[in-house]
Image (spheres, rainbow, N blue to C red):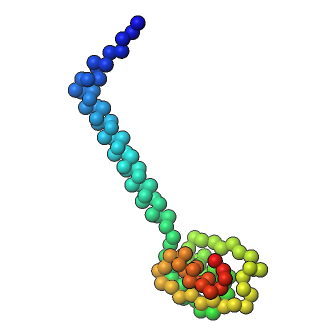
Amino acid sequence: MKINDARHLSHPFAIGIIKLLRIMKLTAIILLIGFLQAHAEGFGQPSVTLSIKNAALPIIFSEISKKTDFRFVYSDDLLPANKKFSVEVTAQPLNIVLDDLFKGSGLS
């Protein structure tokens, strides 16, 4: 029968190694969380600056697409045919721009 001998783990050198490994794991976890947070902030919505008066929605969508990486998919049947929209924003997030654009139109 083999007896487990744990005397080698109580050596001061082994205890130091175990503490060092724990510190390294904790440091790696903290760095990973920091990198993920920075990566997530990099994918936030871009700021948009627009000044368009009395234009149809497809024209406004086209201008927003030129200034951002967003593309709009819509059906012409759902858009108001003869209604003109105006939008004037400076360095606003895209969701604020679209909320301002669609205010009072019944679109969301």
Q: Residue at x 54, y 84 (%)?
A: 50
Quadrant housing residue 51: bottom right
Residue 47, image x, y percentages: 49, 76
Q: How many marks?
A: 0
Q: Is residue 33 left or right of residue 106?
A: left
> Visible in this render: residue 24?
yes
Residue 107, image x, y percentages: 66, 80
Q: Where the N terminus falls, by quadrant?
A: top left
Task: Name the foreground residue: 66 vs 82.
Answer: 82
Residue 35, image x, y percentages: 41, 54
Q: Residue at x 39, y 46 (%)?
A: 29
Find the residue positioned furthest to the left.
12
Q: Residue at x 25, y 31 (%)?
A: 16
Task: Name the foreground residue: 34 vs 59.
Answer: 34
| Residue 35 vertical placement versus 87 (above, below) | above
> Visible in this render: residue 59?
no
Quadrant housing residue 39: bottom left
Find the residue positioned furthest to the right.
77
Residue 92, image x, y percentages: 49, 79
Q: Is residue 76 left or right of residue 34?
A: right
Quadrant housing residue 101: bottom right
Q: Where the C terminus falls, by quadrant?
A: bottom right
Q: Is residue 12 left or right of residue 103?
A: left
Find the residue positioned furthest to the top.
1
